[in-house]
Image: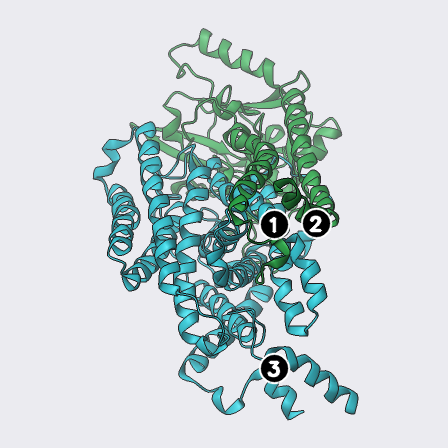
Chain colours: A green, B cyan
Amino acid sequence: MSTKLMNTPEKGASSCSRRNFLKLAGIGGAVALSDLAHASEQTASPGKGAKGVLVDTTLCVGCRQCEEACNSANRLPKPDKAFDDESALDEIRKTTPTAYTVVNRYNVDKVSVTRKQQCMHCVEPACSSACIIYAMEKQPNGAVTYRDDLCLGCRYCMVSCPFDMPKFEYSKAAPLIKKCQFCFDRQLEGLQPACVEACPMEALKFGNRLELIDEAKSRIYTQPNNYIHHVYGEHEAGGTSWLYLANVPFEKLGLPMLNSKPYPEMTAGAMSTVPMIMLLWPVLLMGFHHFTSGNDNAHGGHSNSRHVR
Amino acid sequence: MKKIIHLFMGDPKKMFTPFNIVSGIILAMGFTIIVMRLIYGIGAVTNLDQDTPWGLWIGFDVLCGVALAAGGYSIAATTHLFGLHKYEPLVRPAILTGFLGYVLVVIGLVLDLGQPWRMPFVMLFPRGVTSVLFEVGMCVTAYTTVQLLEFIPAFWEWLGLEKVRQFWTKMTIWLSAIGVVLSTLHQSSLGSLFLMAPTKLHPLWYSNYLPVYFFVSSIIAGLSMVIVESSVSHRLFSYRLSPGAHFDLDELTLGLGKAAAAVLYVYFFIKLIGLAEGGHWNLLNTTYGYIFIAEMIGCIFLPCMFYVYGVRTENAGLVRIVGLWTVLGIMFNRFNVSMVALNWQLTPHYYPSWMEITLSASLVILGIWVFRWIVNRLPIMSNEMPVVGTNTFKALWAQAKAR
């Protein structure tokens, strides 16, 4: 009796359930792909070709020539305060949709330290894994570039980025995200990023990320009294392409204190339950349905006899 | 012509009620704000900035909207999957509320996006497959479709297409099951969104269990919303109940209250486990700690106790009040996660602009207007409609033919 009861609704619903199954399978396939994408991201980025920049804040004098070079390389509008106006350093500034890098002066225990900030180009970027349409692309050379032809402007990258680097054009009718692109086009031509080229103090050094980490460590080793014994960006958030050396604690230079867990892993666990729920829930629910409808045998083929659906 | 206006708008003489006038003004303001956003950008109408990319339109329109629309899948599962058929009179209003809720969520999201016209790309060329937001987007789209399919039988009935309706209802069980699957996924994923902000979300709210919390609390919000919505609509639209329909709403309300109390009870303890796991007990004695305690006691523990008391004393009126209280409590939680406790170290902290609030309010009003419009025409409140419903279409058709 019970088999017959169960068969009736299933038979009638087969056409729709197949369509819904395909729909589910489509999402399931997308989830399976996500693991592949994640895996390739991991293997591609910290490879030997990945570039980086070592910022030695003990050499930086806060001349803002990197800002000027960035401004002209990206053809951004001129700022209100000229680049040789030192009063710009009096307040802590943030990057904006029209300034992808800024230099700030921090007064730490009567020592003044200047630090350039820009997108850190994470080895495993939070923004890329958060983006609904993967508009933030991790390039083999380490750069995290932005596809302005794909972005929906949902700003989840801004929520996700621990360094608050993606900036949104709030005053535009069709706004986009703006941030440092690691001068990706210049790098393709074999040139250094514009800011690195412009630095007169050699505070910025462009090169292979892994070699720069060695370089940073050797500077610490040879001048142990000159530096905090830590290379910021070697492990933070799973590693960043831009690395910092300093002689004061990094948190006093406006850098967030992060552990070594890569950001894509924050949601990986939750995302991995998606296919499990998709496959297990229908079986569980239909099982429930089977057991509870067993008590309902007054209605033969009950799914047809019920009036409100 | 006059008859057609009457059919679509109702009696023009009865249109200018105080509620209609006030809500109409808010709707007009909301529309103006949408036009301003499209011309001058999101910054012109919101208090959002580079440090606070998400505000009321995500915290209320999307997070609260989705949570409060959970009544659809909760009641559909209760009735169709778990076999508690006595709740059937509540199914159609709950599905309609849920469907309209999701449509409003999508509208709210469209207004919050920078380039909303690119939304189809997400589905046509899926790229961001590691993204929690991608999963939310796919599930919300799929589930809105499922809810439309679940709602359509009422439409067939209105048209008098009985055979189509009967055929259509064969999907019911499957649609309910798929609805539960999709809801589990995206209700929880809305919580997972904030897993990406470990440095920005206050430690008392940040937990690896966020997706579990969002899912479990959506059941609470869904059940409580059905309590509130059924009591309001059965009072306002009692004339839409068929004369043959006699069910004891009080009894159903008490049943829902019992279920909500049980889930609230579990929710309280899993929240406590999250607190213990995080180990930030010292933060309880701070301003944010007091907000957290207010949420734990005032929005979870006390409603649970009052639900139990209301059910034990068979006081359906009290259960309805606690239902509203619980709905507000879950909203408080969503506000905390998405606004109050997010970027908690930021000074000055974000607060919504009056235009953001007005637009959110006008979305709610739009929902109420459309709900009222549909309930007054389609057989939502009960299936065995007085003849008016079935004949409206036929009358229209005859009129069109005569011309």
**What amino acid type should be assigned to the residue bearing mark 1?**
Ile
Q: Nearer the viewer, mark 3 or mark 1?
A: 1
Task: Pick whichever, A70 or A286, lies toward us.
Answer: A286
Give the residue number, with chain letter if any, for mark 2.
Answer: A13
From the viewer's perspective, is A144 left or right of A80?
A: right
Q: Is residue B367 visible?
A: yes
Same chain letter for marks 2 and 1: no
Point 68% across, 27% down: residue:
A36
Give the residue number, with chain letter if any, for mark 3.
Answer: B8
Q: Are marks 2 and 1 in contact (CB under 8 Å)?
A: yes
Crowd class of label 2 (few under 14; some 14 to 19; many from 20; radius 10 Å): some
- Residue B173, label in figure: 1
The image quarter in which residue B150 lies: bottom right
- Where residue B91 appears, as percent x and y from the top left, is 51, 60
The image quarter in which residue B111 lies: bottom right
The number of numbered badges drawn on the structure is 3
Q: Secondary structure at mark 1?
A: helix
From the viewer's perspective, is B289 left or right of B104?
A: left
